[in-house]
């Protein structure tokens, strides 16, 4: 569902939760996929994530080199027999 993932962290997060300011150490995971695969990838992250409401957002890719964009498209296609793999 994603061509790649980059894990950044740990990072310090401050946010409102349950009516209080929370502070925690978190990791930021950037995943590259296509618009067509976003909903499926978002559902998978929600299923696997320990948070009740994980941060799942799409950041538009305004431009990229043709070969890089083609790589993302190619790597996120689901060829027959491969199925979805989560690691």
Image (spheres, helix red, strand yellow):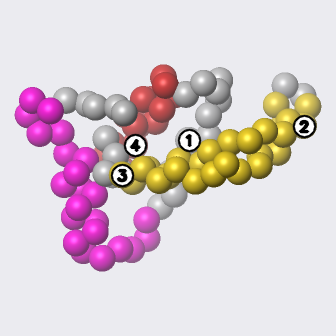
Label placed on residue 4: 3
Q: Position of residue 83 (x, y in %)?
A: 19, 29
C-alpha distance separating marks 3 and 2 = 33 Å
* Residue depicted at 40% across the width and 43% down the height: 38
**Mark 1 element type:** loop
Mark 3 or mark 2: name the one nearer the start of the chain. 3
* Residue depicted at 84% across the width and 39% down the height: 23
Q: Is residue 58 left or right of residue 54?
A: left
Observer-side mark, 3 or 4, equals 3
Quarter-wise, where is residue 43 in the image? top left
- Disc 1 packing (10 Å; few <14; some 14–19; many ≥20): some
Q: Position of residue 10 (x, y in %)?
A: 67, 48
Q: Are marks 3 and 2 in contact (CB under 8 Å)?
A: no
Label placed on residue 21: 2
Q: Is residue 81 left or right of residue 53?
A: left
Q: Position of residue 36 (x, y in %)?
A: 31, 45
Tell me the magenta residue range. 61-82
Q: Is residue 3 above or below residue 84?
A: below
Question: Given the current orientation, which residue lies at the most extreme front position?
Answer: 10
Label placed on residue 38: 4
Mark 4 or mark 1: name the one nearer the start of the chain. 4
- Disc 4 packing (10 Å; few <14; some 14–19; many ≥20): some
Q: Assess whether residue 63 is covered by the magenta stretch.
A: yes
Question: Given the current orientation, which residue lies at the most extreme right position?
Answer: 20
Observer-side mark, 3 or 2, equals 3
Picture quarter with the N terminus: top left
C-alpha distance separating marks 3 and 1 = 16 Å
């Amino acid at each position: 569902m994603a061509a790649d993932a980059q894990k950044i962290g740990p990072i310090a997060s401050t946010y409102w939760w349950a009516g209080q300011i929370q502070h925690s150490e978190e990791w930021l995971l950037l995943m590259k996929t296509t618009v067509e695969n976003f909903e499926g990838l978002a559902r998978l992250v929600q299923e696997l994530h320990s948070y009740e409401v994980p941060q799942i957002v799409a950041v538009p890719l305004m431009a990229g080199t043709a070969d890089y964009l083609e790589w993302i498209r190619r790597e996120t296609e689901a060829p027959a027999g491969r199925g979805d793999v989560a690691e």
